[in-house]
Amino acid sequence: MARILRRSFTAILLLMFAAIGLQAQTKTIAERLGYPADSKLLIIHADDLAVAHSVDAASFDALNKNAVTSASIMVPCPWLNEVAAYAKDHPDADLGLHLTLTSEWKIFRWGPVESKNKVTSLLDPSGYLWPLTAQAASNLKPEEAEREIRAQIERSIALGIQPTHLDTHMGVLFSRPELFAVYAKVAHEYKMPFFSVKIPGLTDKLLIMLSDKDVVVDSVVMANPTVHSGEWKDFYVNAVKNLKPGLTEMIVHLGHDDAELQAVTLDHPDYGSAWRQRDYDFVTSAEFKKALDENHVVLVKWKELKKLLN
Amino acid sequence: MARILRRSFTAILLLMFAAIGLQAQTKTIAERLGYPADSKLLIIHADDLAVAHSVDAASFDALNKNAVTSASIMVPCPWLNEVAAYAKDHPDADLGLHLTLTSEWKIFRWGPVESKNKVTSLLDPSGYLWPLTAQAASNLKPEEAEREIRAQIERSIALGIQPTHLDTHMGVLFSRPELFAVYAKVAHEYKMPFFSVKIPGLTDKLLIMLSDKDVVVDSVVMANPTVHSGEWKDFYVNAVKNLKPGLTEMIVHLGHDDAELQAVTLDHPDYGSAWRQRDYDFVTSAEFKKALDENHVVLVKWKELKKLLN
């Protein structure tokens, strides 16, 4: 009799775990956050903080106005201490790290945080990080990329920043499965959510490394060089109208079209200073707010997603 | 007889060397350059190129207008490649290296060129170069300072810059005899003249390390915090009027008083962005040109002084 009871108890436990597993698998991120399953969740995310004062000034302003929900920081860049000071004054700001393994501009460059001789595969012949994602992808030793991203996280923490999430500048950590594995491993260790996105046929081989507990973004909205400068608002407003249930991240690049940012982005109109001014003008516009309201978009921050990991 | 001849020959040779030595000791730099012995020679020198785009833009403009004769570059700073591009387009520009062992601003910082683990005494607790000269002076190991200044010279050469001279940001290499010895040793090795100045009671113990062949500046003109902003032109015009025969270096800090430079120099009006705008306005003014003409000042460049070393 005791044996039968034990067996039944085990069977019930197994069924319970299976049910929980099924529930965890089928619950959407919206439900996990306490919203209806078919909510349209949106993170409005400003990239590249610390790269230039112009970018910082525009991004801080957008964060202060709640025009963006979140942002991420380029730790190797010279304006990091400006962002650290902002973080100290705005402890509620949703600031993650834009893990940086490239230095892409023509006359404004940076190197790694880690000692150069410990990350030699990250360096171009001039001693700066590689300019292009493809160059980084073909040269980076995963163990050296790991060393560098750990150094970036540790430096930010040492400066008093409490990163809410991680993402990857120019997608370098998506460029090879070994690099994505390093990204996931370090993020798991630091218990931080990290940006990844479902793109069927493209990211499947990366996402199989993740568990149901990981937060995976369903889709991304980002302006690209096919968008004409005169159609900037239309592009974004249409994207908001077409949002689907699930978690979307809108990635914006904010800045002011001033002398500094014109020089940083020299000879590179894509993601250049006028581009960043347009992004800033749009996210702080009344049209954007109206589109978000009319389409019943639920704004979320990475710090809320971080809580799902605990 | 042969012996007597040999002795006489030796005596004549010794006398010749003594005469040459005496001549070298007594010839002024003006004479060595082919000017009358009592000429008032002036180098007008813009410091800090590469620290900020604003500084580069103002300094390039002043160089192009011959409003300054010379400038020097901070190799660890992010805008180095902007200066390298300028140097390529202006092969006659008189550009030296402003050997940099401090990172003094509040929210805009930089680290060394060398691998950090090879120059740990140069780093503050955040991993950037020390902010203050006194901190650098008390922490720097001379062999690590040497390693870093060699790395700065090599990086500049690798980027196509052909430095005409060396000097020392915030005077760090004057702060201890062992550091000055490293500075002189490396400069001699690269056959570059390097800035040093006769200040009785202050630099004597450094200058005894040098030979007659080294170029030593007789005096320096530089604005300082006791000069009221309204008296900027008077300060410089009086300095020009009071120039004495010999070699003077007028050290100026050029920049535009814009958003970038205001942020770089945050909370530090001395040598701040308004200060640099005043310096730029003065060196490019008609009053300055008039004062130089009226006082028969001979402008010289470090590249002319470099020729004296060969």
Image (cartoon, coloured by chain):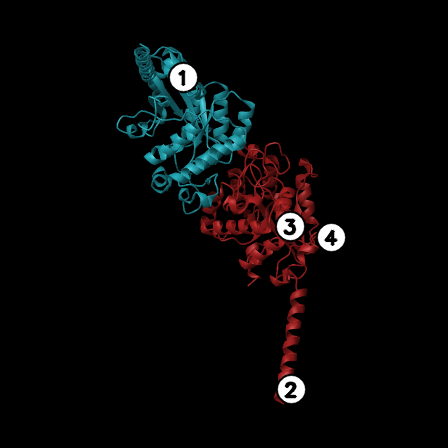
Chain colours: A cyan, B red
> The disc labelled 2 sits on which kind of residue?
Ile
Residue type marked 3 = Phe
Checking the image for residue A288, the label placed there is: 1
The percent position of residue A70, horizontal first and vertical second, equals 45, 22
Type of amino acid at the residue the image marks with label 4: Gly
Subunit bearing disc 4? B
| Mark number displayed over residue B91 | none
Instruction: Give how far apart the Cα atoms at labels 2 and 4 are.
Output: 49 Å
Residue highlighted by disc 4: B201
Q: Earlier in the sequence, mark 2 or mark 4?
A: 2
Marking on residue B4: 2
- In depth, the one of B116 and B236 nearer the eye is B116
Kindly check if marks 1 and 4 are in contact, taking CB atoms under 8 A apart as contact: no
Q: Determine which residue is flagged by label 3.
A: B174
* Chain of the residue under the numbered disc 3 shown in the image: B
Residue at mark 2 shares a chain with residue at mark 3: yes
Amino acid beneath label 1: Phe
